[in-house]
Image (cartoon, rainbow, N blue to C red):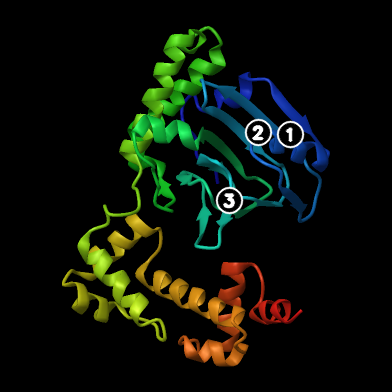
Amino acid sequence: MAYDIPHLRELDRLLPATRTTRPDIARSHLAAIFADHDLRLSAGRVDFSHRQAKLCDTSLGMLRYGTAVEVVAPALDCYVAQLTLDGEVGFRTDRFQIALKPGTLFVMNPGLRYRKTWSSDAHQLMIKIPRQRLAAHAASPIRFAPIASPMDEADGLIGLIAHLCRDLANGRGLSAHAGLRREMEDLLLSALVATRPQTGADAPGYLQRAEAHIRAHDARSIGMNELVAVTGVSERALQQGFRRHRGCSPSEFSRNIRLDAARAALLAGEGVTQTALAFGFSHFGRFAQAYTARFGEKPSDTVKRMRH
């Protein structure tokens, strides 16, 4: 499956590319742009391609590996807006995990250690914005909600990005003038902040009440009927609110809260079976599967690691 935006792929065709079939060169190239990281191949042969253009402090690049890989990276001091055009990219942190499918837009906040799994056909446009640059532009710290939104919901922003890509690929457009390049970058940052949902105090009261109830009852799964009664809003409003502000459904949020509590118990020396039951996981196989998906290791591995 692919998602096409007029002019966006011009950046991929017209800009100079760094291409290699050697994983070590691919890793070192991106390490110089983002940070040192681990690059793990699942199978196949790397056919790495990265094309990049800069405004001022902000850069735009088209990236693909040409085979299935996993990237394990430290916390970055930048935001990375990610437009997935082809394939699928899995994104996981200690706090959440999300699938980035074709036609979706996701903004990664600074300060998150993460893992990304790229399918062999995955292709992304990535916009790197230094943390201090965006904070200075917005006159306050910004935290984007961990949501992969359809690009169709942000037509103005996507259209602006496509225009910038076309102008940068041209080499003789407005971005060739230093003063205008700064103004174009400011416009991009303003559009990103105005368009993308953010976390924090802007979350509606009913959502904060739902979260507080879930956290206060982390020994069991919280059903929708219970949340409707607690918050006084409809099931549809709850589903939409959690998706918009937290990037997941209410049931997924409840499960993740319980998994986080279970991990804390395991790290404190509790046993796996006792911990699973204590936080409402009666099916041990499903508990182990969900735990592994969220934290990258089995519950038993967490216990073994703490004992050594």
Labels 1 and 3: the sequence-earlier one: 1
At 78% from the left and 42% from the top, the residue drawn is 46
Give the camera-side residue of 135 and 169. 135
Q: CA distance from mark 1 to mark 2?
A: 7 Å
Residue count near mark 2 (Cα–Cα under 10 Å), binned few <14, some 14–19, many ≥20: few
Q: CA distance from mark 3 to mark 2?
A: 22 Å
Q: What residue is pinned by disc 1?
A: 29
Q: Tag count in the figure?
A: 3
Give the image location of residue 25, x and y in percent: 80, 36
Give the image location of residue 24, x and y in percent: 82, 41
Q: Is residue 229 above or below residue 134?
A: below
Q: Is residue 17 above or below residue 221?
A: above
Which amino acid, by three-letter code, is at mark 1? His
Which amino acid, by three-letter code, is at mark 3? Glu
Which amino acid, by three-letter code, is at mark 2? Ile
At 42% from the left and 70% from the top, the residue drawn is 252
Q: CA distance from mark 1 to mark 3?
A: 22 Å
Label at residue 88? 3
Label at residue 209? none
At 37% from the left and 24% from the top, the residue drawn is 187
At 25% from the left and 81% from the top, the residue drawn is 226
Give the camera-side residue of 169 and 302. 302
Q: What residue is pinned by disc 2?
A: 33
Callout 1–callout 2 Cβ contact below 8 Å: yes
